[in-house]
Image: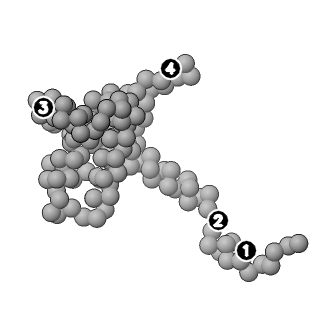
Amino acid sequence: MALLVLGASAPLLAQSPETFEPAFSADDDLDCAIFVGALMAEMDAEMTPDNRVGLTSAFTYFVGRYEAQRGIKLTEAFTARYPVYLASNPAEIEQTCSIRMRAFGARLQAAGSALSQLQPSPASTDEQADTPPQE
């Protein structure tokens, strides 16, 4: 399997003010968690720290989405879903999950950039530290 870098963005949810419909089912999320977990196990020996962080983040994202929708114990869910996952089309699962991981990565990068812009610059922080408090 090719190493996937978290990147491009795509909307994952279809929603309107009246309804909320996930674009992906809990089973889709569990399939992606299984895919990412298998990828991490396959790459373990040669995985870079950056790859490990990205894949761990993706695994956590898919598991969190699954648990939010189902609330079933994770071990039971993996055990029940794994035979279905093995019988599925692995290329389709890889493609779908890869797109979703890149979209998630892009959203995290955008959020990080937005948060960084909200922080005062180091120069203004230094200026504030040098200025005595006004009473």
Which residue does the image show at 15% across and 48% down from the upper left?
1
Q: Is residue 86 visible?
A: yes
Q: Nearer the viewer, residue 77 or 7?
A: 77
| Distance Cα–Cα, label 2 vs label 4 | 39 Å
Reply above or below: 117 against 89. Answer: below
Which amino acid type is marked by label 2?
Answer: Pro
Determine which residue is flagged by label 3.
83
Vertical placement of residue 7 versus 14, above or below: below
What's the distance in space between the residues labelled 1 and 3, CA to CA? 60 Å
Which of the two marks, 1 or 3, is nearer to us in this view?
3
First reached walking from the N terminus: tag 1 or tag 3? 3
Alpha carbon of mark 1 to alpha carbon of mark 4: how far?
Answer: 47 Å
In the image, taking residue 122 as reference, residue 100 lies left or right, namely left
Between tags 2 and 4, which lies in front? 4
Q: Secondary structure at mark 1?
A: helix
What residue would you read off at disc 1? 128
Look at label 3 and name its amino acid: Pro
Q: Are the residues at dot 1 and dot 4 in contact (C-beta closer than 8 Å)?
A: no
Amino acid under disc 4: Thr
Q: How far apart are the two marked residues, 3 and 4, measured between alpha carbons?
A: 33 Å
**Along the line of sight, the residue nearer the viewer: 110 or 43:** 43
Specify the quadrant of the image occupied by residue 90: top left
Q: Disc 4 marks which residue?
A: 19
Residue at 16 percent across and 56 percent down: it is: 43
How would you rate the neighbour count of disc 1 (Cα within 10 Å): few for under 14, some for 14-19, many for 20 or more? few
User: Which residue is at 36% across, 36% downward?
Assistant: 67
Q: Answer left or right for 32 relative to 10.
A: left
Quadrant holding the C terminus: bottom right
Instruction: Provide residue 126's location: percent of width, then percent of height.
Output: 67, 77
- Disc 2: CA contacts within 10 A as few (<14), some (14-19) or many (>=20): few
